[in-house]
Amino acid sequence: MSTFRKAVGDKVDLCLDLNFNFKTEGFIRVARVVEPYNLMWLEMDIYDPGALLQVKESARVPICSGESLYNMKGYAPFLEKHAMDICMIDLPWNGYIESRRIAALADMYEMPVAPHNYYTHLSTFMNAHFCASIPNFKILETDVDSVPWRDDITTEVPEIKDGYLYLSKKPGIGIELNEKEIARHPWPK
């Protein structure tokens, strides 16, 4: 993190995703170590809201979590405890309506939402419309490390300028799947 911070200075936000790679004690140790690097957030996955709150209260780094949770009832214990600083919602897993309900619940607890989006451009377009429809949107993740043919399986690619993604003016979510290109890349057996 020190190398990244030195390379980009303070003008670029850094995030670190730990997934499920530690237990509570390990997450706390990492959170304390990265404090000096002024992260936008430290992301982690924990299924115990009390354990996540313990991590959050043990260090001065914003905590982002929730990408592995399902439905509003799954998020509620985390949001009620304020166990995270940023609520990450996975739209493809939860669906549009349920994701809006989760975002509304997060908003009720004064918490920003950052959608989990490491999928295709289709997901990015879906998430962009979701983000435009909620009052507590913070930032949209997008994965730039993908297969070389990712741009070919959709009719459009996200338009990102100066860090901002622009919504398509086309009908629906503004993108269609290219079925012929998808068929060229079957799932391995």
Image (cartoon, grey):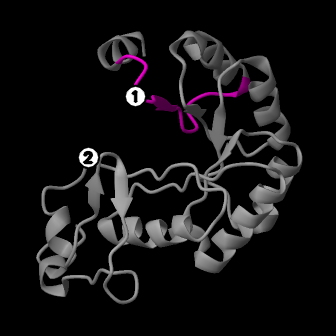
Q: CA distance from mark 1 to mark 2?
A: 19 Å
Assign the magenta stretch its main secondary structure.
Answer: loop
Question: Which stretch appears magenta?
Answer: 9-24
Q: Which mark is residue 24?
A: none
- Please report the residue visible at 65 percent of the width from the left and 50 percent of the height from the top: 66
Left or right of 150 on screen, residue 103: right
Of 147 and 80, the residue lying toward us: 80
Image mark for residue 145: 2
Pinpoint residue 119: horizontal percent, then vertical percent.
37, 61
**Relative horizontal placement of residue 83, taking residue 170 as reference (left or right):** right
Q: Is residue 133 above or below residue 36?
A: below
Sequence order check: which comes first, mark 1 or mark 2?
Answer: 1
Residue 126 vertical position relative to residue 135 in the rendered view, above or below: below
Name the outermost residue toward the bottom.
171
Residue 6 occupies which quadrant of the picture?
top left
The amino acid marked with disc number 2 is Asp
Three-letter amino acid code of the residue under disc 1: Val
Q: Is residue 169 magenta?
A: no
Q: Residue at x 19, y 82 (%)?
A: 178
- Which residue is at the front of the view, 108 or 61? 108
Asked if residue 24 lies left or right of residue 189, the reply is right
118 over 35 or under it: above or below: below
Residue 46 point in image, percent of width and height: 69, 41
- The structure residue drawn at horizontal position 54% and vertical position 38%, both measured from the top left corner, is 19
Which picture quadrant has residue 12?
top left
Please give the name of the residue rendered at 13% of the width and 78% of the height, measured from the top-left corner: 181
**Which residue is identified by label 1?**
12
127 displayed left or right of 188: right
- Residue 2 occupies which quadrant of the picture? top left
